[in-house]
Image (cartoon, rainbow, N blue to C red):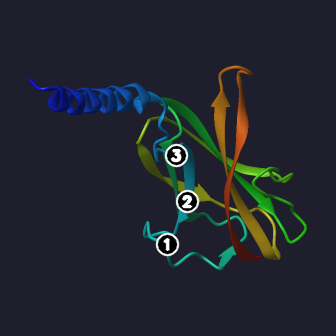
Amino acid sequence: MDKETSVVALAIVTILAVFVALQPIIPTNSERFSAIGVLGPQQTIANYPKTVAKNQPFLLYGFVQNNQGPVEYYQVLVKLGNNDTIVSNTTSASAPVLARYSSVLNYGENITFPMNLSINHNGTNLRLIFELWMFNTTTSAFAYTGNWGQLWMNVTST
């Protein structure tokens, strides 16, 4: 092999070696996240109830997806609030819990589950708040993920 060919071959080998060495530290687009959703009675993003009767059950569906870690233990809290209830991606709502739903999901898995709910008092512009919590193995307690959804509804006398 002549000198020029050797230099080109050495350059190619060097570039490949650098590329292989850097692969583990090159960032990827695999963002880790958890997701929550609320679906209407037909398991679609439509036909949500706007008015329900006091103490009468109504059906919604919850959706949770794990793109966070290998196995995660989730809990969905359904809370009843109003215009004054504060909830954000950093603060969970300080409101009464109407229902809890739990599930363990592997990475990449999701679950859709029925939520049979009822509200025990009348009101206008009541706010159903759906919060996603995840079990923290370090503290052995559920921690608020900052993911939440809401539905506004009126509750009438039966």
> Secondary structure beneath disc 2?
strand
Mark whose residue sits in front, 2 or 3: 3
Q: Name the residue carrying label 3.
A: 31
Q: Is residue 140 visible?
A: yes
Q: Secondary structure at mark 3?
A: loop
**Residue farthest front in this picture:** 3
Q: Amino acid at mark 2?
A: Gly
**Front disc: 1 or 3:** 3
Query: What residue is disc 1 on?
Result: 45
Q: Amino acid at mark 1?
A: Ile
Residue 158 visible? The answer is: no
Mark 2–mark 3 distance (CA, rounded to whole Å): 19 Å
Q: Residue at x 64, y 30 (%)?
A: 135
Few, some or many residues within 10 Å of mark 2 (<14, 14–19, 20+):
some
| Quadrant position of the C terminus in the picture | bottom right
Mark 1, Cα crowd under 10 Å, few <14 / some 14-19 / many 20+, is: few
Of the two numbered discs 2 and 1 on the same chain, state the one appearing first in sequence. 2
Q: Earlier in the sequence, mark 2 or mark 3?
A: 3
Q: Are marks 2 and 1 in contact (CB under 8 Å)?
A: yes
CA gap, disc 1 and disc 3: 25 Å
CA gap between label 2 and label 1 equals 9 Å
Query: Is 136 situated above or below 58?
Result: above
Q: Quadrant of the N terminus?
A: top left
**Placement of 124 over or under 102, stated as above or below:** below
Q: Which mark is residue 88?
A: none
